[in-house]
Amino acid sequence: MSYLSPPKLEKTYDRLKGKTVFVTGATSGIGEAAVRLFAAEGANVVAAARREDKLASLVEELRAQGLEASAVGCDVNDAASVEAAVNRVKGLYGQLDMAFNNAGTNAGNGPLHEMEPADFDYVMSVNLRGVFLCMKYEIAAILEHGQGGSIVNTSSIGGLVGMANMSGYGASKWGLDGMTKCAALDYARQGIRINAIAPGSTRSEMFDAWMPTEEARAGIAAASPMNHIAHAEDPARVALFLLTEEARWTTGAIVPCEGGMSARAHTLA
C-alpha cells in the first residue's frame, strides 16, 4: 500500500475572511486539520475540545503565523459546557457565523449482541446527542445576528452503508444524517445551510488506535476503490467548501469523501 502525499496548502483565497467559525473535536485528525485550514482562509477560528493543553499549543502555533484563533474547552456530552463554549465564541468575536461539528468516537465495536449497553449509550451520546447539543446552541447564536450562516457536521461512510461489527457507530451516524437533513429544512428560510461530510478511512489518532499495524491499515486501504487512506486535510477541504459561499445552493446534503466506497457497496462486510 502506498499513501497519498499530504495535500499542500500552497495558496489560500480568504474564503472565510471575517467569519467566525466554531470547531469541535479540534485537537486531532480532521478537526485539527480544519482549524488550520479555516484559519489560513481568513476565519476567526474558535477551536474546541476537552484536551485544553493541546488546544493551547495549536492556537499558539497559529497565532505565531499571524492567523486568528482562540481556544475553548468543551465536552459535547455536557449541555452546559456546549452552551458556555458558544457563549464564549460570541464574547470573543461578537457573533457566530459558522460551525464544524467534528467531535466523535467509535467505541464499542463488535457483534451487536456482544456490545455493552454503556458503550452504545456513549457512542450515541457523543456522535448524535453531542451534535444535537452543538447545533441547538450554534443555531440560536447564528439566528441572533440574523445574517444566516453555515454548519457542517462530520458523519461517516458508516452513515451511508452498513458496516459489520459497528452497529452502535452506524446507528449514530445514520441518525446524524437524518438530523442534518431535518435541521436543514427547519432553517433554510432563515439562511442557515446545514450539511454533513461522510469521510471514509482517514489517518488520525482514533484511526491509528483502531488499526495499529501497517498490515491492518493496508487491508482497510484495499477495501477502497482508490486503495488509499485519506489524510485529515482531505475531508477538511470538503468541509471548507460546504461552509463557503461556493456551496450557497447546497443544504441538507451528506457529501461522501471516502474514496468511492459508497459508490460500489450497499454493505461493507
Image: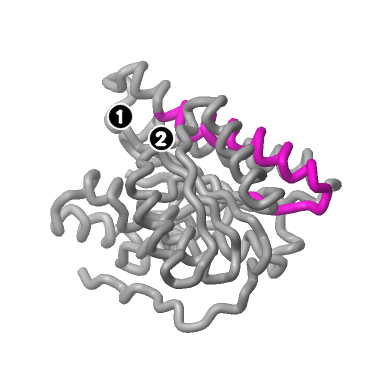
For mark 1, give the secondary structure.
loop
Work out which quarter of the rendered image holds the C terminus and state it. top left
The residue shown at (49%, 33%) is 76
Q: Is residue 152 above or below residue 42?
A: above
Residue 262 rendering spot, x and y as whole percentages:
47, 55
What type is the residue that disc 2 sits on?
Answer: Tyr
Q: Which residues are magenta?
A: 123-151
Q: Are marks 2 and 1 in contact (CB under 8 Å)?
A: yes
The residue shown at (66%, 35%) is 137
In magenta stretch: residue 125: yes
Q: Mark 1 = which residue?
A: 108
Q: Is residue 267 left or right of residue 247?
A: left
Q: Is residue 115 left or right of residue 184?
A: left
As drawn, the residue found furthest toward the top would be 117
Residue 252 visible: no
- Badge 1: how crowded within 10 Å, few (<14), some, or many (20+)? many
Q: Mark 2 = which residue?
A: 169
Comparing 257 with 105, the one in front is 105
